[in-house]
């Protein structure tokens, strides 16, 4: 059964939304977001989400190699991530209405 997620309203929700919908996330998805690594770290440490990490390499426009982490959401953590997403979403909606 496919779950319909509401559009994210915070940076943390946006990172989590991408993890749920794509199954993985990296700084390449969020090059515009200051604090991307902090958002991923918070999902792991504050909310207990378990993510697998895959080391990746790519080349920049000057043909120089750089390395980065691809954060992968395991299938067994997907439902926990969806539940967390709805919790974070409802909390952000409550703050807007106050």
Image (spheres, helix red, strand yellow):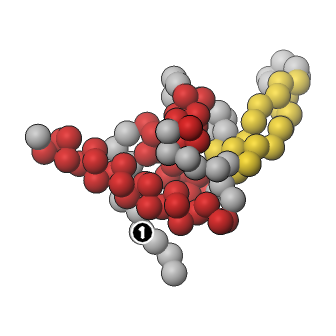
Quadrant in which the C terminus is drawn: top left
Residue 32 visible, this orientation: no
Could you say where residue 56 lies in the image, as x and y percent from the top left?
A: 83, 38
Q: Quadrant of residue 64?
A: top right
Could you say where residue 92 lies in the image, as x and y percent from the top left?
A: 28, 44
Q: Quadrant of residue 9?
A: top left
- Tag 1 residue: 4
Q: Is residue 58 left or right of residue 44?
A: right
Could you say where residue 76 lies in the image, as x and y percent from the top left?
A: 65, 66
Q: Say which of 62 and 16 sits in front.
A: 16
User: What's the residue at 83%, 38% (across, down)?
Assistant: 55
User: What's the residue at 80%, 43% (across, down)?
Assistant: 54
User: What's the residue at 73%, 48% (across, down)?
Assistant: 52
Residue 77 drawn above or below residue 95: below
Residue 42 visible, this orientation: yes
Q: Is residue 51 left or right of residue 55?
A: left
Q: Residue farthest to the left? A: 98
SS at mark 1 in the image: loop
Could you say where residue 85 lies in the image, as x and y percent from the top left?
A: 43, 54
How many numbered marks are there? 1
Q: Is residue 78 left or right of residue 14?
A: right
* Badge 1: residue crowd in 10 Å (few <14, some 14–19, many ≥20): few
Q: Say which of 83 and 56 sits in front.
A: 83
Q: Is residue 22 left or right of residue 59?
A: left
User: What's the residue at 67%, 65% (across, down)?
Assistant: 75
């Amino acid at each position: 059964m496919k779950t319909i997620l509401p559009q994210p309203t915070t940076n943390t929700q946006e990172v989590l939304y991408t993890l749920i919908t794509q199954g993985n996330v990296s700084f390449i998805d969020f090059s515009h977001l200051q604090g991307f690594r902090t958002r991923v770290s918070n999902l792991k440490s504050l909310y207990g989400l378990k993510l697998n990490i895959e080391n990746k390499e790519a080349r920049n426009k000057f043909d120089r190699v750089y390395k980065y982490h691809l954060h992968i959401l395991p299938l067994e953590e997907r439902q926990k991530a969806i539940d967390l997403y709805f919790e974070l979403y409802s909390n952000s909606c409550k703050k807007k209405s106050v």
